[in-house]
């Protein structure tokens, strides 16, 4: 049963505004960070502690590479690898994410500064669910409706909801965090983002 909701995840935008402007969070089951990086064809970069340092390094790398490389920050959380991309989208880019999900579960959500967003759930190279968190009524994948109850429970607003047009903050991004936790059991916390020393790597952009 889903317990974490969008309302429980609003701290992310409040406490990490620089990262919250544009990011991709990915959770991969049963692989170590180095294995995830290898599957994405990446190369190792110096480790960094805390997401403030990760965000700064990510933009430094973009400038130094003339936009040709994207920083990935990774850490193990139980049986999962958490991968964070400031201003990146590798985790929801299907020609990379689906092959990399071979033999495992891959859950990723993305937001950029232009308001574009995406949520991807893949199992063993198969896209089970893809949708835009801001527009959850339209969904694609082999099981696009399997998580409908959970999506309602965590706080996505659907067009037929009575509260859909009610005034209030847009909670689609926090709802994506809550849905990712529902699928993985991994709770992303402020302490995790602030205190973790992340193994880092980079991949080429396309």
Image (cartoon, grey):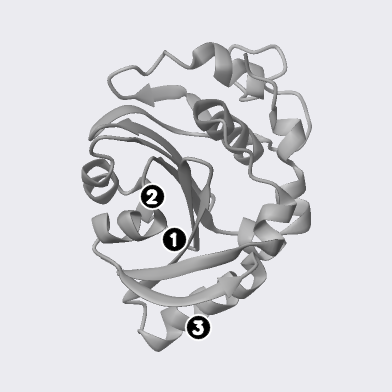
Disc 3 to disc 1: CB gap under 8 Å: no
Which of pointers 3 and 1 lies earlier in the amino acid sequence? 3
- Residue drawn 43% across and 79% down? 62
Which of pointers 3 and 2 lies earlier in the amino acid sequence? 3
Q: Which residue reaches farthest bottom?
A: 64
- On screen, residue 84 above or below 71: above
Side of 66 relative to 52 (left or right): left
- On screen, residue 66 above or below 103: below
Mark 1 and mark 2: span between their CA atoms?
8 Å
Numbered circle sitting on residue 88: 1
Mark 3 and mark 1: span between their CA atoms?
14 Å
Q: Which residue is mark 3?
A: 60
Residue 143 at what x, y percent from top left?
33, 17
- On screen, residue 24 above or below 52: above
- Residue drawn 53% across and 42% down? 78
Q: Secondary structure at mark 3?
A: helix
Mark 3 and mark 2: span between their CA atoms?
20 Å
Give residue 155's quadrant in the image.
Answer: top right
Quarter of the image where the N terminus is located: top right
- Residue drawn 40% across and 57% down? 33
Residue 159 visible: no
Q: Secondary structure at mark 2?
A: helix
Disc 3 to disc 2: CB gap under 8 Å: no
Numbered circle sitting on residue 91: 2
Q: Nearer the viewer, residue 54 or 13?
A: 54
Q: Nearer the viewer, mark 1 or mark 2?
A: 2
Give residue 204's quadrant in the image.
Answer: bottom left
Mark 3 crowd level (few <14, some 14–19, many ≥20, 10 Å Cα): some
Disc 1 to disc 2: CB gap under 8 Å: yes
Q: Secondary structure at mark 1?
A: loop
- On screen, residue 113 above or below 130: below
């Amino acid at each position: 049963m889903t317990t974490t909701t969008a309302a429980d995840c609003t701290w992310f935008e409040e406490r990490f505004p620089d990262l919250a402007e544009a990011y991709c969070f990915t959770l991969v089951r049963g692989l170590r960070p180095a294995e995830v990086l290898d599957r994405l064809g990446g190369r190792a970069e110096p480790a960094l502690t805390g997401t403030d340092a990760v965000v700064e390094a990510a933009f430094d790398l973009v400038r130094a590479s003339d936009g040709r490389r994207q920083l990935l920050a990774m850490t193990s959380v139980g049986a999962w690898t958490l991968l964070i991309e400031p201003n990146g989208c590798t985790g929801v880019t299907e020609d990379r994410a689906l092959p990399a999900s071979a033999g495992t579960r891959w859950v990723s959500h993305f937001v950029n500064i232009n308001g574009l967003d995406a949520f991807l759930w893949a199992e063993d190279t198969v896209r089970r669910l893809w949708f835009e968190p801001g527009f959850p009524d339209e969904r694609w994948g082999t099981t696009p409706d399997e998580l409908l109850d959970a999506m309602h429970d965590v706080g996505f607003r659907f067009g037929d909801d009575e509260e859909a047009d009610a005034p209030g903050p847009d909670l689609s991004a926090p709802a994506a965090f809550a849905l990712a936790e529902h699928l993985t059991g991994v709770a992303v916390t402020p302490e995790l983002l602030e205190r973790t020393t992340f193994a880092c790597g980079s991949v080429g952009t396309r």
